[in-house]
Image: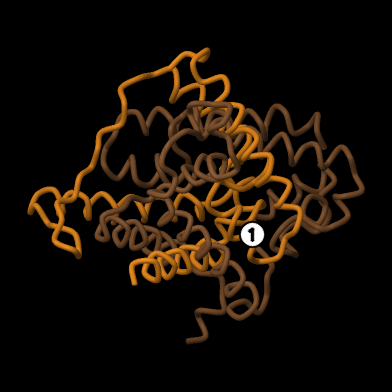
Amino acid sequence: MNWIYEPWPWYVSGFMIALVMFLLIMVGKNFGMSGNLRTICSICGGGKKVDFFRFNWKAQRWNLTVVLGAIIGGFIANQFLSVDPSIDLHTETVQNLQTLGFENAGATYMPEKLFSTTVFSDAKLLLLLVIGGFLVGFGARYAGGCTSGHAISGLSNLQLPSLIAVIGFFIGGLIMIHLIFPFLF
Amino acid sequence: MRTLIYLLIGIVFGITMFKSEAASWYRIYEMFRFDSFHMYGIIGTALFFGAITILIIKRFDITSFYGEKINFPPKQKSFARYAIGGILFGLGWALAGACPGPMFTLLGAGFSPIIVVIIASLLGTFVYGLLKDKLPH
């Protein structure tokens, strides 16, 4: 059972994601996480101002329960199933991040620069997290899904719209990292 | 009972996101630099088993655990919404390094700044709802 404490290889991870999708399908639901953001907006009263949030959110409680599980799963994995939280990144990635001002990339699970509490006293980095999150929320709803809904569920079902969306995800990601990052960091 | 099943599925999903390192900002960055096979291996394997699963369910009319018919509603036909929305999502995914599943896993793992990303993503979702009828779909 020692393997469980190591980072999981890609083939185990990929299989587990397919298993999660399979289980959700077999209980009559579907695998898509970004819909929860809309549901939470609705619970917070978004429907008072915007029609898009006026729907029976109670029918989506099952998916919020999945999200609650994802939070608990993150806690369990970090607290009890991980010994060494470092990420075995490719050396070129580490060197490249060094030039952008990310020291010791991969030594921790997340970059200290953006995800340690010091970010709360750095207005610029905080703004970058806000912009990133905003685009994720806006883009996912505009495209009608995110990585789980399009890249996994949609592509598994051979949906052309999902292929367009996933190509879009990559165009956006490549532009951000190769063209915009040098100006941000 | 069903609620407990959803919770357990979510826990398996959360553990998988963390242990696969798909929830790590670094892995997303590395993926967009094409420096490592790791993320492509994860997505590829998930798609391989996912596509076979859905094919079998459709081919043999397999019903759910509760005996209900399983539907796979086709996605709405369009180009603009998937292309534009997809690119905007990709820009955010690469910057924040987290998509709507892993961001909650990271919250559970205790990375407090992810709260900023989550709240901003809710704001982004709300603004989309506000502008929906003015955007090309």
Residue visible at 7% across and 54% down?
Answer: B60
Image coordinates of residue A143 in percent, x first then y, are: 46, 29
Q: Which residue is mark 1?
A: B106
Left or right: residue A29 compared with residue A176 = left
Q: Nearer the viewer, residue A78 or B129?
A: B129
Query: Which chain is depicted orange?
Result: B
Report the label total: 1
Q: Position of residue B67 (x, y in %)?
A: 13, 61
Most foreground residue, A25 or A87: A25
Residue B10: image location, x then y, percent: 45, 64
Quadrant occupied by the C terminus of chain A? top right
SS at mark 1 in the image: helix
Provide the letter of the chain coloured brown: A
Q: Amino acid at mark 1?
A: Leu
Q: Quick one: A48 or A154, which is closer to the camera?
A: A48
Q: What residue sits 33% from the left and 40% below the top?
A: A154
